[in-house]
Image: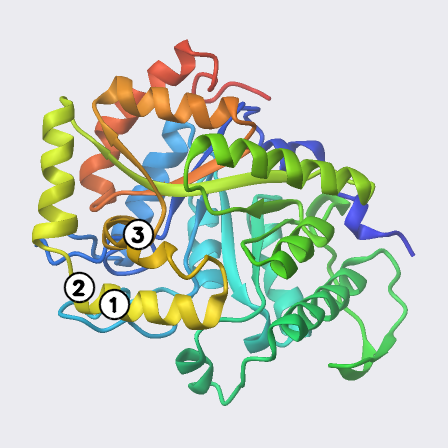
Amino acid sequence: MIDVRSRVAGDRVRMARGNKLKLGIFGSNCSSGRAATMVPERWSGSWDDNLRLAQLADDAGIDFMLPIGRWRGYGGETNFEGRTLETITWATGLLAQTQQLRVFATVHAPLFNPVAAAKQIVTADHISRGRFGLNIVCGWNQDEFDMFGVDNREHEARYRYGRAWLDVLERLWADDTTPFDVDDEFFHMRGLVAEPKPYGATRPLTMNAGASPTGREFGTANCDLIFTPLRDIAAGASDVAAAEARARELGKSIGVCGNGFVVCRPTQREADDYLHYYAEENADWGAVDRLLALNGVQSQSYEPDHYQKFRTRWSAGHGGYPIVGDPDRVADELTRIAEAGYYGFCFSFVNYLDEFPFFRDEVLPRLVARGVRTDPGASA
């Protein structure tokens, strides 16, 4: 049986366009996106708006879109992220109506039977001719898992389960069509078989955002891409180097991604003022406090003092790295992230459709001039 973990086509990893820093739109499948704000222009999360955004991003040369896997909102005045689109079907719909854009689904492994997930993923992969990506989540908020009657496992066991879950997918995706059984710590299944295989005899890209030591090791060992919290760019460069070194020890390569939010306006003053307006004056602090409590207790992704130190980052963009300024400042920050060795950076806006065109017209050309990006539509 061929090891599908080694079979990822080069253009899947390069995301076809070969940009030095891949750019991704983050969190648009959720109401309010990643901004816990009460401003009236906050993101709708509707299907129509998501489709318009995906097609704009595709035409502009954006590399990928990444959704948030969410099953209930965080409360507050807006019930932050309370209206969401399920990510596998969301991705499939967008992939069917775009040309080059990669679209990921964020899948909570404990909530999806791996046999069903393998089939859903391959279907989306064929519809898109190989542009589907899988973001694996091994554990999350217990109040969401309660809706499914599922308990979060102890932290270390979550990742053992994730590896066993991924093993089932990879065996179903492998060339061998002989039915097989699975009998391990987590799964007891008989006669597993699946056709078709992933598109082009190469498996989909996989990513993981585990930030604890166990989560980082899981992602580095088992996935093509990992996310690391980006607090500042100098520290981020060390995180990238450490991840890449660990991947080499494991006999593989890894792409490291960061995430954040963008506020881009014609002047620095306008950008700063808008950040203050939506993330402080009109923050949904009830939702922010709920978000911080759940992340601090259950995800183990950050040190305890991170949540209060960077509280406004959580209202502004779910705790992500802030890129706030005029087009030159925004382009400079993205260039620094590329120079730190990051494979990709995914980001959000308060209102993606309102703000993306200015970013497209003013920031992307500056990144091309800096050698960070290629012209839209250029071949890898």
- How much space separates mark 1 and mark 3, taking CA atoms? 13 Å
Q: Are marks 2 and 1 in contact (CB under 8 Å)?
A: yes
Q: Is residue 235 left or right of residue 360?
A: right
Q: Position of residue 347 (x, y in %)?
A: 36, 41
Q: Quadrant of residue 331?
A: top left
Q: Position of residue 192 (x, y in %)?
A: 80, 75
Q: Amino acid at mark 2?
A: Trp
Residue under pointer 1: 289
Q: Amino acid at mark 3?
A: Lys
In front: label 2 or label 3: 3
For mark 1, does the 10 Å Cα neighbourhood hold few (<14), some (14 to 19), or many (20 or more) residues? some
Mark sitting on residue 105: none
Q: Amino acid at mark 1?
A: Asp
Q: Give whichever of 378, 228 is nearer the camera.
A: 228
The numbered mark, 2 or 3, whose residue comes first in the sequence reads: 2
Q: Give whichever of 48, 80 is nearer the camera.
A: 80
The numbered mark, 1 or 3, whose residue comes first in the sequence reads: 1
Residue under pointer 3: 309
Mark sitting on residue 285: 2
- How much space separates mark 2 and mark 1, taking CA atoms? 6 Å
